[in-house]
Amino acid sequence: MNPIAFLRSRPAWQLVLAALLVGAGVWFVFRPTKAADDNLVVAAKRGPLDIKVLVGGSIEALESHEIVSEVRGEPIKILRIVEEGYLVTDDDVKTNKVLVELDSSKIKQNLVSQDITFQSTASALTEAQQSYEIQLNQNKTDIKAAEQKARFALMEFEKYLGTKISAEVIDRLGLREDLAGTNAPVRTNLTTRVDFTQFAKAELLEDGVAKQELRKREDELMVAKTTSAQAETKLAGTQRLFDKGFVTKSELENDRIAFDQGRLKVDAAITARDLFIRYEFPKLGEENLSKYDEALQGLIRARKEAVSKLAQAQAKLRGAEGRFKREKRNLEEMNEQIEKCLITAQKPGLVVYGGGNQRMFWGNQERIAVGAQVYERQPIITIPDPTKMGVTVGVHESHIKKVKRGLKVKITADAFPDDPLTGEVTKVGVLPDSENRWMNPDMKLYKTTVAIGGTREWVKPGMSAKIEILVKRLDDVVYVPLQAVTTREGKQVVFRPGATTPTEVETGDFTDEFIEIKKGLAASDSVLLRTPTDNKTGGENQGAPEAKPAEAAKQTASR
């Protein structure tokens, strides 16, 4: 790292502070002993050398209670706020003292409209619930009626053919199902014709309407045959008597007519029986089967329609419930927003306006005051914890390898320089801080947190302080001011008073003020604080130096 670039990359106040520290250190530790070639002369010292990292920062609370605006939406005006610096007490917390009051008038206006909307959705929800219950009961009624119709149709079919033949036909057509169940077969018509004439036999038919009808016709045929046989027998007897002259011809003709009538009745009975078997029996069989199938399909439709209608009613109910919950939540949130316009004390401490690390205000963001507009999540008040104070500083990349957690730190507040504080490093950033990099992209600072040990009544957030991080202590070394070391032809050198050539040295650790000399100088050896630039120092010293002293020393020591 180029030390000059390092120094230039620091903020102005750090440069001024570093310059003052360096000047003071050089003056008190290395008082000039004599002048040589118009340059200050100092003597190398031997003794303990503390390797420190010097940075500046502001005291802040490491832990604090931040009060932010929780009112959503547009910015809201501050109507009332406690004065900055007010000390919140435990009694204030117990009594819920109001620290900030925000303007809730617009929210209250919106609350009226929201309440009307909520009442409307509540009414719609009640209506949807009742419609759902009505549809549920209607579905039960419709399905029950359809099941009853199908059951009665099946009974009519069984009544006509008998349970055995009707069961055989139903199983053959795949119409068998539990009428009280939900897995009814899906059919649109009877695609398979049934030949009912095959069942038109008395021995096959069980006791039923069809068997009674068939038996009736067979009985009529049997009576007709008996009557016809009797008429035939009588006619034969009358014919014999007529031949012998015992009866008249008219009597013979009457018996012949009776015989012919009996034969016609037999033919009519046979025809009636055959017509029943061929036409009426299958017609009535198919008609009863069709009625059963139609009733069964009606049951299927009733169940499907019940599912569809119930789903529609349920969808409307869920929609009404969703709208009700949404409007209820909006109403509750508005009431909560009104409550959040009154911010009460939750923790004792000192009132500080804005966020704890707020440095400036951007855009339309106003300073915290009565009448100012605040945005959602914008800090309004910060109440720091006075028992947990510290400093967050930016450590330059040239020193970051030296800084570790647990290192001891000396903190000197500018307002109380005679009462230094102690602390230790608690956190070291792993990435460069990007907060101020837009101002100087070459500056790489790592956020480092220093916790202050103990408490002081005078410690307040925002106080400027000088931080000295003790990296390590060199017990017995030779050291000179950092400005005395420079680079010539790639070597680290110092200039001795009156010498015509520089003295090569080997450097070690360094601070912002001093650098360790491992070889090349002894204690009390005099060196120049500035590189000679005029002709009095000899030919090798003529012209501008290859590198400035501070830069040269740090380049070598940091390798």
Image (tube, rainbow, N blue to C red):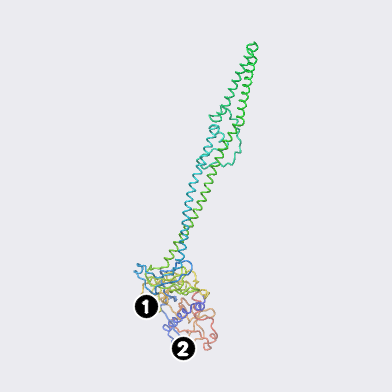
Element at label 1:
strand
Q: CA distance from mark 1 to mark 2?
A: 38 Å
Element at label 2:
strand
Mark 2 highlights which residue? Answer: 35
Image coordinates for residue 539, horizontal then vertical, percent = 54, 86
Packing grade of label 1 (10 A; few <14, some 14-19, many >=20) is few
Image coordinates for residue 25, horizontal then vertical, percent = 43, 81
Packing grade of label 2 (10 A; few <14, some 14-19, many >=20) is few
Residue 471 is left or right of residue 544, and the answer is: left
Residue 480 is left or right of residue 235, and the answer is: left
In the image, 509 versus 196, the foreground residue is 196
Q: Please tell me which residue is depicted at 56% across the width and 26% down the height of the picture.
A: 216
Q: Which mark is residue 419?
A: 1
Find residue 269 and report its image quarter. top right
Q: Earlier in the sequence, mark 1 or mark 2?
A: 2
In the image, 559 versus 96, the foreground residue is 96
Image coordinates for residue 256, horizontal then vertical, percent = 64, 18
Find residue 85 and report its image quarter. bottom left
Looking at the image, residue 453 lies above or below residue 167 = below
Q: Please tell me which residue is depicted at 59% across the width and 42% down the height of the picture.
A: 188
Residue 63 is left or right of residue 161, and the answer is: left
